[in-house]
Image (tube, grey):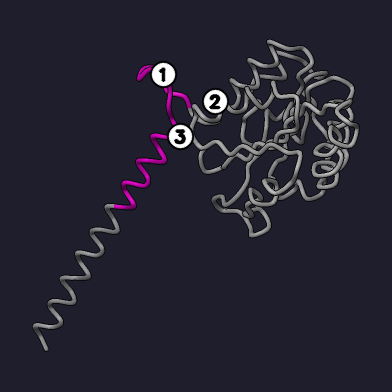
Amino acid sequence: MAMAMNKIMHGARILNSVQNHFRLAAAQCISSRAMSSTSASNLLTVRDALNAAIDEEMAADERVFLMGEEVAEYQGAYKISKGLLQKYGPKRVIDTPITEAGFAGLGVGAAMYGLKPIIEFMTFNFSMQAIDHIVNSAAKAHYMSGGQLTVPLVFRGPNGAASGVGAQHSQCFAAWYSSVPGLKVIAPWSAEDAKGLLKSAIKDTDPVVCLENELLY
């Protein structure tokens, strides 16, 4: 009996050691992917990569503007828009009321008239308030107009599980939006992915949903 208990305890210690090893490896993987760059001396966080992508595209094209809750004066709930208000002014970095249906609809209309909005949702859970504008107005306009209308805009913000938030702030909508005809969906998880994919999304002539992850910012 004692020998059997010793074997069980020994096996438990081995299992615990293996689990700790995998936890450490996973944490190192996430850390290394969250901070990446082309040179070792210039590390870039995912947050800064997203900021740089928006900054570069706003500088390159005056039709690009950013709109959402707390994106201007507060510089974004997660500081993605840090410094953009000071650089581009309140006509291109626009704080909105807490009305997702309102500013998402404004963004769709602006895109139809030739501008290139970036619509930030504080969390994609709140995008449900604007779901008709996203999956019907934005996604279907090009097809239903026989190609006469384009809707070049980006809906972006944190999506999925996060740290210390409630259940209604933790849902992942990747499968939802990926099943909608007319939408392009991206989900970057490294700094390189984030910058490159967001720049391409802003340049695209179709509506793009950019699902970011708060844990990687």
Left or right relative to 14: residue 140: right
Q: Position of residue 98 (x, y in %)?
A: 82, 42
Asked if labels 2 and 3 touch by Cβ distance under 8 angstroms, the answer is no
Whole-number angstrom distance, CA of label 3 to CA of label 1: 13 Å
> Which residue is the site of mark 2?
48
> Which residue is the site of mark 1?
38
Q: How many marks?
A: 3
Left or right relative to 189: residue 93: right
- Which residue ends up furthest to the front in the rendered image? 146
91 or 187: which is nearer to us?
187
Q: Residue 134 lies in what quarter of the image?
A: top right
> Which residue is the site of mark 3?
34
Q: Decide: few, some or many residues near mark 3? Use Cα within 10 Å; few <14, some 14-19, many ≥20.
A: many
Task: Look at label 3 and name its amino acid.
Answer: Ala
Badge 1 or badge 2: first in the primary sequence:
1
SS of the residue under disc 3:
helix
Seen at 60% across and 50% down, the residue is: 160
Q: Residue 60 lies in what quarter of the image?
A: top right
* Whether residue 194 is situated above or below residue 127 in the rendered picture: above
